[in-house]
Amino acid sequence: MNTNVSASKKPKINRACDSCRKKKARCDAPQTFPNQCSNCKEGECTFNNPAPKKGVPQRYVNDLEAKLERYEATFGPLPPSAMSDGSPSSEGSHKRKFERSNRDNRDTESLTEKMSALFFKPDDEPVKDNEKERTRCFGKSSMKGIVKRITLHADFTALDLNTEMRSRFWNEEFITQTMRHSQAPYTHDDFGDQNLMYELINAYFDKVNVTLPLLNRERFVLDIPKHKLERSFGSLLIMVCALGSQHMLMGDKRVLIPGREDTQFLAGHQFYLIAREKFIDQISTVASLQDVQAMILMQLYVQNGLYPKSSWLISGNAMLLAQDIGLNIKWNDSKEDSYQQESRNRAMWALFILDTSNSAALGRFQLISYDDINLDLPSEIETDSKSRLSVRYMNQSIKLYKIVQDILKSIYWLKSNEKEGYKVSYNDIASLNSRLNGWYNKLPSELRDAKKSDDEEVFQMKCYLKIAYHTSQSYIYKSFLPDPSSAEFSTFRLTSLFICLNDSRTIISIFDDIQRAGTNSRGLCHSNCFLGWSTFSACLILVLCFCESRKNGDLNKNDLEYIQKGIQVLRKMEARDLIMGRAVDMILQLVIKAEVPLDHLFLKNQWNLSNNINPDQAHEYLFKSQLTFPYVDNHVQENHVSDVMDFNFDQFDAGLGGTEALNALMPSLDSREDDWSALLSTVFDGSSFNTVNNVA
């Protein structure tokens, strides 16, 4: 029997109305449509939808029709102000008229703004931010999974929700209108002279973005004419100008506070004040990527100015805004191009670096862990070799700060009242040593050896990585430094003292090399507080080492010379960094109080520099009247310290296999007699404490 039946002989399947289907009666509605079928003459015939074409789901057709209706309502007649002479038009394009739906118009207002951007706008016309396009991120523990499952069952969307919304619960405009705020839009006057603005932008990318490549230079400059007056981009641009101001030539009155030209570290303060006034309302508005980037730059700015301790608070705020919009999560969003995805990655990793830096320098909790970031490392999308090297520098910094986070968690862990507490063993120290050495040994060759022939910024990047290595090493051991209140002898304490001493010498020597290598007329490249404040910490460790050696009858005059060199390094940076100036004042007072016998002529000159001597003359003196210091071979010194780090730590443990806890060697950080917190608060808070003797 032949089973191949031709298509013409296949039985024709007719559709039926509901009444005929229930009665299982033959329905002739396909032939009588649009009239009723013969079986429904007395009632209503429900046959009103012809069968769709084979292979096309009816739901797909319905969705397309719904989208078409929304688009037609959106692309209504454009206002005359949005049209331009160069916009394409034709007679046929104006024949079709659309009716606008109020509800659909509200739902797609952001799409209308996108289409309006296709046309040229006058420069003075205020620009709207597409705030309604921004969405918040909801993690796995939220109700997102339940809602997703329900929508799969019920085919429920946000458009369905729009049909039944009581305005008193959903309309937020009347609430925001009652809030008092001064978020006026940006104007061209906010950014000052255009030529100066571009000078500041160049200074930012040359000195700040090179060590923290948050922005793409070419793309950013191209976006300025189009987005300058938008709130988010305007905030980002004005903070770029503020940071660029800190790297202008000394005494440039265009960026200094009138009447306070001696405060170079406050350069660009007028831009900072405008940014604070015109930032988005972070309570009622969802942030954008550019808002987060602007907050990152604000943190960098206040770190060098009047509010260094507040940089941690700004970092936390930026971190919350970033997680609110899911910057720490890898998205598969087809709407984002590679540039946008890369910008998101860099913003989040920049926050990670700054958070770890603040946690280490200020002794604060870490707000985000390396494991909390589900993103790829930054990619080298730039075209020039120097920018690509900056990205490699950032990637190496990320890897190092992951180790720094583990150092902070392992050694500076706060004890719990309920549990026994976290114990640090020799094995933990050895493991951290090994990881830190492994990071340094794996540095790419183009970032390892700094040469005098290198570009100024490239030379500083290479030096910063070496400084970061020694600073991280000192963090492993500085909690185990000798305790002056204890007479107990500890070999491990002396080893820790020796390692921190060599780290401090190396840090000061490298910074001195950086200052001597180039003109540095616009200051050093940006360094976060973990790196930038390392000279301050190194000087304190050197003073401690000298006091310990004097106590043990083993004076080392080299320590005195390194203390003097450290003070000179800080002195050269104080004009552009407020903390460095306070550090100089503190160390000069400290060496006198501790009776550290520095050179009398050196101390006299330093006090003269701190009183009534022009900063330019002071710096000139420092370069012409350098003391003679012993030569320190950094390479040999690093190998020597590395040998110490590779010690068999079991030798410090009497047969316990390196598992004995070292907590007993750590001084109590929460002791009531410990005055370090008050002393450091004086340094960071300045005039807010009565103990500060301000020098005009």
Image: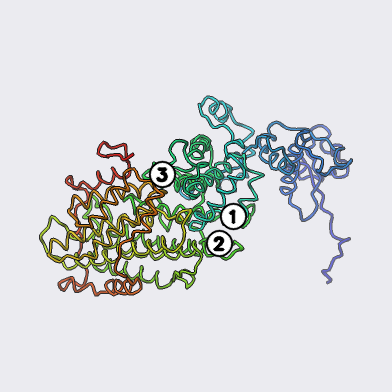
The answer to whether 213 is drawn above or below residue 684 in the figure is: below
Which circle, 2 or 3, is nearer the viewer? 3
Q: Name the residue type under label 3.
A: Gly
Which circle, 3 or 1, is nearer the viewer? 3
Residue in the image at 71% along x and 45% along y = 63
Quick one: SS at disc 2?
helix
Residue in the image at 77% along x and 35% along y = 78
Cα gap from disc 2 to disc 1, whole angstroms: 9 Å
Cα gap from disc 3 to disc 1, whole angstroms: 25 Å
In primary-sequence order, the first of circles 2 and 1 is 1
- Do the numbered discs 2 and 1 sit on residues whose CB atoms are within 8 Å? yes
- In this picture, residue 552 sits left or right of residue 71: left
Residue 229: image quadrant is top right
- In this picture, residue 566 sits left or right of residue 151: left
User: Residue 387 — which label?
Assistant: 2
Label 3, residues with CA under 10 Å away: few <14, some 14-19, many ≥20: many
Say whether residue 144 is visible: no
Residue 343 x %, y %? 56, 54
The residue that label 3 is drawn on is: 305
Cα gap from disc 2 to disc 3, whole angstroms: 27 Å
- Do the numbered discs 3 and 1 sit on residues whose CB atoms are within 8 Å? no
Q: Name the residue type under label 2.
A: Ser
In primary-sequence order, the first of circles 2 and 3 is 3
Label 1, residues with CA under 10 Å away: few <14, some 14-19, many ≥20: some
The residue that label 1 is drawn on is: 217
Quick one: quadrant of the N terminus?
bottom right
The answer to whether 649 is drawn above or below residue 474 in the figure is: below
Q: Name the residue type under label 1.
A: Arg
Residue 588 x %, y %? 26, 50
User: Residue 338 — which label?
Assistant: none
In primary-sequence order, the first of circles 3 and 1 is 1
Residue in the image at 76% along x and 45% along y = 24
